[in-house]
């Protein structure tokens, strides 16, 4: 009976002009919240968007876990000033996994070190308990033009 009710709802939504969000839309929204939380230094909100199994690879080769990344954001050792997409592609792998790739312009500070350049990145998003969470991230600096 439940399956029939759910199917009926899915059939009615388009008729009402409503539709379920696509994987791409859901991941894009989760990532926008991640970027905004990072720019604001809101580690508590950011924590909700990161997988407990996160592997976060930085440009300089450092790799951080979720607790280490959140500690850096909380301590203000790592602050992002700008994170502007130049190119963004989201490729669903399944209903619960998506690959995000592209290029972005990044301005950030880590202590006395300030960076301002374009990067190429690859991110893996995974739906965990109904919420899209960043599972893996790696970036590399692009040559200056």
Image (spheres, rainbow, N blue to C red):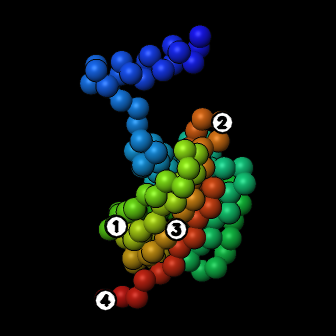
Q: Earlier in the sequence, mark 1 or mark 2?
A: 1
- Is 19 situated above or below 32? above
Q: Which mark is residue 129?
A: 2
Disc 3: CA contacts within 10 A as few (<14), some (14-19) or many (>=20):
some
Quarter of image, res 14:
top left
Mark in the foreground, 4 or 1: 1
Q: Secondary structure at mark 2?
A: loop
- Is 33 situated above or below 15? below
Residue at the image position 52 percent from the left and 60 percent from the top? 99
Would you say 57 lies left or right of 9 here?
A: right
Q: Secondary structure at mark 1?
A: strand
Q: In this orientation, does residue 126 appear?
A: yes
Disc 1: CA contacts within 10 A as few (<14), some (14-19) or many (>=20):
few
Marks 4,1: beta carbons within 8 A: no
Q: Earlier in the sequence, mark 4 or mark 1?
A: 1
Give percent across and percent down for residue 109.
50, 70
Residue at the image position 53 percent from the left and 73 percent from the top? 139
Give percent across and percent down for residue 136.
62, 61
Mark in the foreground, 4 or 3: 3
Q: Which mark is residue 87?
A: 1
Residue at the image position 54 percent from the left and 62 percent from the top? 123
Q: CA distance from mark 2 to mark 4?
A: 43 Å
Q: Earlier in the sequence, mark 4 or mark 3?
A: 3
- Disc 4 marks which residue? 145
- Disc 3 marks which residue? 122
Q: Nearer the viewer, residue 37 or 93?
A: 93
């Amino acid at each position: 009976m439940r399956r029939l009710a759910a199917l009926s709802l899915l059939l009615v939504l388009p008729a009402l002009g409503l539709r379920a969000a696509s994987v791409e839309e859901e991941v894009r929204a989760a990532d926008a919240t991640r970027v905004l939380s990072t720019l604001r230094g809101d580690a508590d909100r950011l924590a909700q968007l990161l997988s407990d199994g996160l592997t976060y690879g930085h440009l300089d080769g450092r790799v951080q876990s979720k607790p280490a990344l959140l500690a850096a954001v909380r301590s203000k050792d790592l602050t992002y000033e700008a994170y502007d997409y130049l190119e963004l592609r989201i490729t669903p792998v399944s209903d619960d996994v998506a690959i995000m790739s592209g290029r972005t312009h990044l301005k950030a500070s880590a202590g006395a070190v300030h960076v301002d350049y374009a990067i190429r990145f690859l991110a893996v998003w995974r739906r965990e308990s109904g919420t899209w969470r960043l599972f893996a991230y790696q970036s590399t600096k692009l040559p200056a033009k």
